[in-house]
Image (cartoon, grey):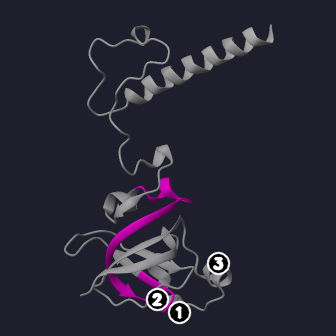
Amino acid sequence: MRTRDRRSTRAMAAGIVAVAGLGLAGCNTEGPEEGTDVEDVSEGEVLESSPAPDNNPTAGDTFIGNYDQDFYDESETYAGQEVTLSAEVTETLSTDTFVIAGASGTAVDPLLIVEEQEIPPLDDGQVVQVTGTVAQDFDIAATEDELGIDLEDELYADYEGEPYLMATRGEILEQE
């Protein structure tokens, strides 16, 4: 009897996976394949579908790409996730912090980068790629306590309560 129960469980699990796959395939932007119904798919058959879109925060993907206004506007979605952003350094505030904005000529809300681990010295205008964890609600005192650093409060007033990136890696992609 146990063998039959296992087979039934496996068959049911395979059916659930197939239905879940169809649900995800229905989420692509090209629309479902015409004439295909759930009942038309036999057990074990896999429908072709478009790959998941890059940088889909709801799928738990890590964001890897250029820093832009869309990322800033959706930063809450990425809170607690590790991301990799490429952008231009617009201001170096201290040896432990700097600000990025989109590529040259792009209007994007600035994003504060706090170096959790040391990153090579940067100059304004350089294009960098930084990897770190997205955090919400920047708090000067909490950051100073967490990292054991002293920040000039007036330099960070505009970033208080805003999203920021706690960087663990960074590299220069382009010089000025």
- Label 2 to label 3, Cα distance in Å? 16 Å
Residue 87 on the magenta span: yes
| Residue 133 sits above or below residue 142 on the image | above
Name the one closer to the observer, 59 or 45: 45
- CB of mark 3 within 8 Å of CB of mark 1? no
* Residue assigned mark 1: 152
Q: Residues within 10 Å of mark 1 (few under 14, many from 20)?
A: few
Which one is in front, 57 or 145? 57
User: Which disc, if any, is residue 142?
Assistant: 3
Give residue 155's mark: 2
Disc 3 marks which amino acid? Ala
The answer to whether the residues at label 2 and label 3 have Cβ atoms under 8 Å apart is no
Where disc 1 sits, the SS reads loop
Q: Secondary structure at mark 3?
A: helix
> What range of the chain is rendered magenta?
74-98
Judged from this view, the residue extending furthest toward the left is 105
Residue 108 position within the rendered picture, expressed as x and y whole percent measured from the top left: 30, 68
Residue 73 to residue 118: above or below? above
- Residue at the (35%, 62%) spot, across then down: 65
Mark on residue 82? none
State how far apart marks 3 and 1 are (Cα). 13 Å
Q: Determine the residue positioned at 46% across, 26% down.
A: 21
